[in-house]
Image (tube, grey):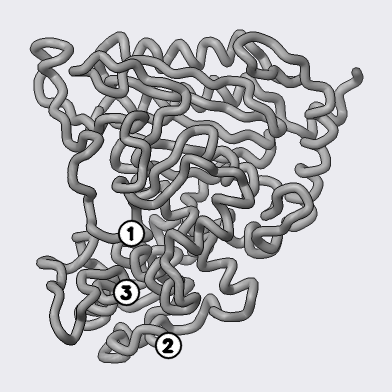
Amino acid sequence: MQRRCLAFSLLAAALCASLAGQGDGAKVARGCDVEALNKAAASIEQLIAKHEVCGAVVMVSYCGSPVLHEAFGFRDVHGKTPMQKDTLFRMASNTKAITAAAVLTLVDEGKVGLDDPISKWFPTWVAGEAEKITVRQLLTHSSGLRISSLFMRPLMKKSEKHPDAPSLVLECARFGKVGPKEEPGTTYSYSNPGYNTLAGLVEVVTGTSFEQYCTERFYKPLGMVDTNNHESRADLDRMSVVVRGRSKARWNARWNARWSPGDRATMPFVRGSGGLISTATDYEKFCRMVLIGGSVGAKRLLSTELVNEATKNQIPHIEGGRYGFGWRIDPDGAFSHGGSDGTFIWCDPARDLVGMVLTQTQGSKALAPARKRFRKLVTVACTPVEAIRRAPR
């Protein structure tokens, strides 16, 4: 597995040397079917024309270079503000891959063990069955937690004892008193509280904010200049409105704004289950780092060993669970994730490919099949790296 990541990295570097510039500043690589890519883009454009979503940014990078990057529709349908390639998105659960990566840096440094109990850092988790829950189980959604909300409600209020309330660490401490509903390590159930606790773990271990830690460890080294972890720190002039369909009467009337730039943030503090603000270009840089085994240039951000663990199924013994560390593991060997506000990303190691369909439309029944078709067309368009290596020039 480790050899696979390194081999793809070398092959990608060699292939990128053969890129030729074509159209709109994008590059099209050898082994890439431009017509099929155009069909993929058109399929999303048609989705918007049918008023199934308001707008989208699509991106595909292949062998380290962008081969498709387009914006369609509106980022504010009521204000008729067009979607742009550099539009900022609420990435929602696509945050989890970065949360997991942050925890894995601490594993790399020997500060955290995957099979350590979380109660080692959160004393309130010592009581009852919560004491059994490990870092690995939180990473793989197999902790047995069944808390349906992001945090316990209501959030804590400031007090003499807790002048910083509400805060990520204080709110995560409360989960331990609830504990798991199922035996830890035996079932899969997607858990936002679990990933919020992992972000809290980063804060406890490092003594710094989760956002600051991610900035120093990932955003700055990768050049993710537009990425942060809270709506209040985003460039509101480039943020998309988040909408949800309500009727099919008229194009504008159909959409109900669920969040608009300048609205109150989902939470008053940074969390690990969601909250990431990013662009297609920025998030691709993080995905690319994962695809090539954890480095950027000569700088290593994660060990290849842990990247390989993150991108394989960690819970094959659990029925219905195909999850690594921060990534869903697909049957075809790719890994992917979606977000509740309408974002979807997948990474295909065999093709050294990152694909994205980023929208801010919640609850569209047509979106999932449309992005499945988009992904299929992109997969057909981009030849596996190994096949290119063997092909005569």
On-image quarter of the N terminus? bottom right
- Which residue corresponds to the image point at 23% horizontal and 18% vertical from the top-left? 77
Q: Position of residue 26 (x, y in %)?
A: 64, 18
Question: Residue at (31%, 61%) from the top-left corner?
Answer: 191
* 64 left or right, relative to 83: right
Q: Between tags 2 and 1, which lies in front?
A: 1
Residue 169's disc is 3
> Which structural element holds mark 1?
loop
Which amino acid, by three-letter code, is at mark 2? Lys
Residue 368 horizontal/vertical position (percent): 35, 30
| Mark nearer the N terminus (2 vs 3) | 2
Q: Quadrant of the rendered structure where residue 20 is?
A: top right
Q: Is residue 101 visible?
A: yes
Q: Which residue lies under the disc numbered 1?
A: 270
User: Dot 3: few (<14), some (14–19), or many (≥20) neighbours within 10 Å?
Assistant: many
**Lower sequence index among marks 2 and 1:** 2
**SS at circle 3:** helix
Find residue 120 and name its label: 2
Residue located 68% across and 34% down the image: 351
